[in-house]
Amino acid sequence: MTVSDEPATASVGLAIPDGPSIPATIARLGRKLHDVPLSQILEGRAANALVSINSETGTRLVSVSSVLARPVPLKRDTWIINGGLDWEYKDVRKIRSLKKKANFKYVSIIYDIIPLLYPQYVVPFYVDLLKRYFGELFWTADYAMCISATTRRDVENHLQQSRMPVFPMDDWPLGCDIVSDDAASGRLPTALKDRRFLLYVSTVEPRKSHRTIIDAFEHGIRTGQISDEAMCVFVGRIGWNVENLVQEIKTNPVLADRVLFLSAVSDKDLLELYKNARFVVFPSRYEGYGLSLVEAMALGKACIAGDAGSLREVGGDAPLYIDPIELPEWSRAIATAFNDDEMVANLERRSRSEYAPVTWDESARRFYRSLERWMETAR
């Protein structure tokens, strides 16, 4: 987007041509760039960055220059959709100034407002930045699409408490289908062969309550309630402020060989992990949605979830809910789930019968239907 004294314009994406597959592109670049200095590679990347695009023929890499085409005028009938997660890349105050001049509409997608509600769960560096970002966004947006009714209510309550105007908002569900671009089945790590394991798919950070699972798992082992073959599997990158937890696990003789950290897992391998897990846990202290919970339910898995944020909204009557900080209850539930086939089978039945999966295609349709309804009323 350009802000100047010239007529307001923005770039718009047009048809995206098919490009080479990601593995082929990486291999080709590797051959071409073998002897090229790093400084020259960085200059080239800045001049023509690549983005990943999903198409009918699979995931492709295309250049940004091929996606961005002609500039379009920003005027009364122009709608700009802010996809969120852009707080480091957009100056919302300048956008608001431009909006006053050009009178276009600004639509925001809001995932959660954790920095405003629970700043202790945000990387310290981002707390003030995100508070300023949301403050500017709430004065700029004409309409918002929230990823859950919980997030929408949180935003509305915050605006009312802050004595700010409450602008129109709607919510829609995210998809839960994991689509692999490879027909072959995924592979389980060797360490999980013939083992029962609980699965938690999430970035490892304080808000996600991985320590609750670790403490409950260790308690079950030490008291003999969890068998020697049971494993605990965390899928997700190592986030902030968990260095001590990770170090404790690695040096704890009871846990060192029983807790597996996995990251950069492919969709097909993630599907394999879900399908083979004894049960899935999601003890987060707050969520704007809870994507891995709905993924697990859509696959008919037994789920034990925290009773916080949007998790009860998206999970309905399928999971077993436990307060994220109630360690004794988590200890009992995890030990029981490892040993009680009837409990697991009942939770699996509830996932299949009580949860209505939403595909990503259907999620997109609902998003645009809501947006189109508001566009009609706003004209």
Image (cartoon, helix red, strand yellow):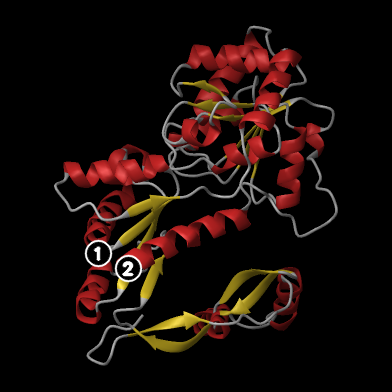
Residue at left offset 26%, top offset 55%? 167
Q: Picture coordinates of residue 70 (x, y %)? A: 47, 89
Q: Amino acid at mark 1?
A: Thr
Instruction: Tell me if 211 is positioned left or right of 252 in this view.
Output: left
Q: Which residue is mark 1?
A: 140
Residue 254 vs 81, above or below: the answer is above
Residue 73 visible to an observer of this rendering: yes
Which residue is more in the foreground, 302 or 43?
Answer: 302
Residue at left offset 37%, top offset 67%? 376
Location of the C terminus (image quadrant): bottom left
Decide which of tag 2 and tag 1 comes sooner along the chain: 2
The outermost residue toward the bottom is: 6
Residue 57 vs 174, above or below: the answer is below
Q: Which residue is mark 2?
A: 106
Determine whether the residue tagged by mark 1 lies in a helix, strand or loop.
Answer: helix
Q: Are marks 2 and 1 in contact (CB under 8 Å)?
A: yes
The outermost residue toward the left is: 163
Instruction: Tell me if 206 is positioned left or right of 135 in this view.
Output: right
Residue 232 visible to an observer of this rendering: no
Q: Picture coordinates of residue 362 (x, y %)? A: 60, 54
Location of the N terminus (image quadrant): bottom left
Instruction: Tell me if 342 is positioned left or right of 151 in this view.
Output: right
